[in-house]
Amino acid sequence: MIGRYLGRRLLLGVLLLLGVTVVTFILLYLLPADPARMIAGRSATAAAVERVREQLGLNLPLYQQYLHFLGRVLHGDLGRSYMQRVDVSTLVGARIWPTLQLMLASIGFELLLGVTSGIIASLRPRQAVDRIAMVLTFVGVSAPQFVVGIMLLYVFAMYFNWFPMGGYGSPIHIVLPALSLGLLGSGWYSRVTRSEMLDVLSQDYIRTARAKGAGPWRTVMIHALRNAALPVVAMIGMDIGYFMSGVVVVESVFGWPGIGQLMWQAIQSVDAPIIMAITMVSAIAIVMGNLLADIVALFVDPRIKLR
């Protein structure tokens, strides 16, 4: 059963990936910017631009360009960057590990802050603690990323001098960028956790557990939280794809050398091979994140059946 389910999900993932590459390829083709002109330079002659276009295969019909791209991908070749003249796989590979680190640390902060505040708020509904937690989550959800990042830099890096202003290379460098993303995402986790916990805590089996002498900690953490965790697990699966697509603003504020910075540079220079590669990485991350969330949900709630 599990093998058939995984096979079907992977097949759907491949179809989704094909659809994403087709749409992205068409959008890049429709852009008014001319990569050949940008590579050749503004002062290049029309003949020089045409030679560059022919070398890159940009003079071919769109469907032929896409088929050539697809054939290279199937052989593990993501092409070469138009501007940097380096294999795209090398450029993307060098940025994946920093992005993975930032993703894991950010999700950790989201869960720590969001789930904890959601549980506390659900235990004191419509009281001061609940209202304060919900106001803070609203602020966290609404605050722009660059504002939160700059505030954290000013307070903890410039004023207290506890953390570096930016950069990459040691665990201390990841704290502020991950905390920025964690603060912004924790609001959603807090609201979802509070809503689910309020619903679960009103169920009959919770009252039965309390009547049998289960303590507050066991009632909340074992009986209630486990049954309220499914939406949180689904959100983690979506966040994996979100972070792997590159969080451009936060990476720019903190000088984090992740995929987001590379994507932004590629968009500015219409470097199609890099844009296509990062789009594929993001689509794969979304598919795998959702698949992982579904598998984890089986262990969280055994009542779930695969179809």
Image: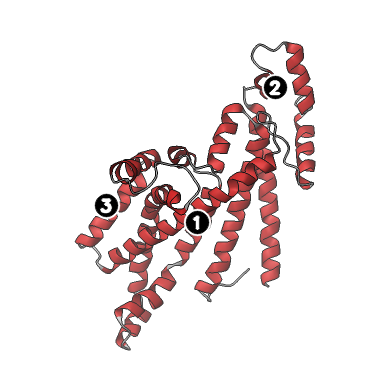
Cα distance in 3D space between marks 2 and 1? 38 Å
Helix, strand or loop for disc 3: helix
**Which corner quadrant of the image does residue 127 belong to?**
bottom left
For badge 2, the amino acid type reads Ala
Rendered image: mark on residue 36: 2
Horizontal side of residue 127 vs 19, given as left or right: left
Question: Residue 224: x and y, percent?
Answer: 38, 74
Is residue 217 depicted above or below 104 in this figure? below
Query: Which of the marked residues, 2 or 1, is nearer the chain's N terminus?
Result: 2
Horizontal side of residue 101 vs 181, given as left or right: right
Is residue 274 depicted above or below 120 in this figure? above
Helix, strand or loop for disc 1: helix
Cα distance in 3D space between marks 3 and 1? 26 Å
For badge 3, the amino acid type reads Val
Task: Kindly identify which residue carries mark 1.
Answer: 104
Question: Residue 125: x and y, percent?
Answer: 25, 65
**Which corner quadrant of the image does residue 306 belong to?**
bottom right
Cα distance in 3D space between marks 3 and 2? 51 Å
**Can you see residue 27?**
yes
Task: Kindly identify which residue carries mark 3.
Answer: 135
Question: Residue, x 35% and y 75% (percent of image)?
Answer: 220
For badge 1, the amino acid type reads Leu
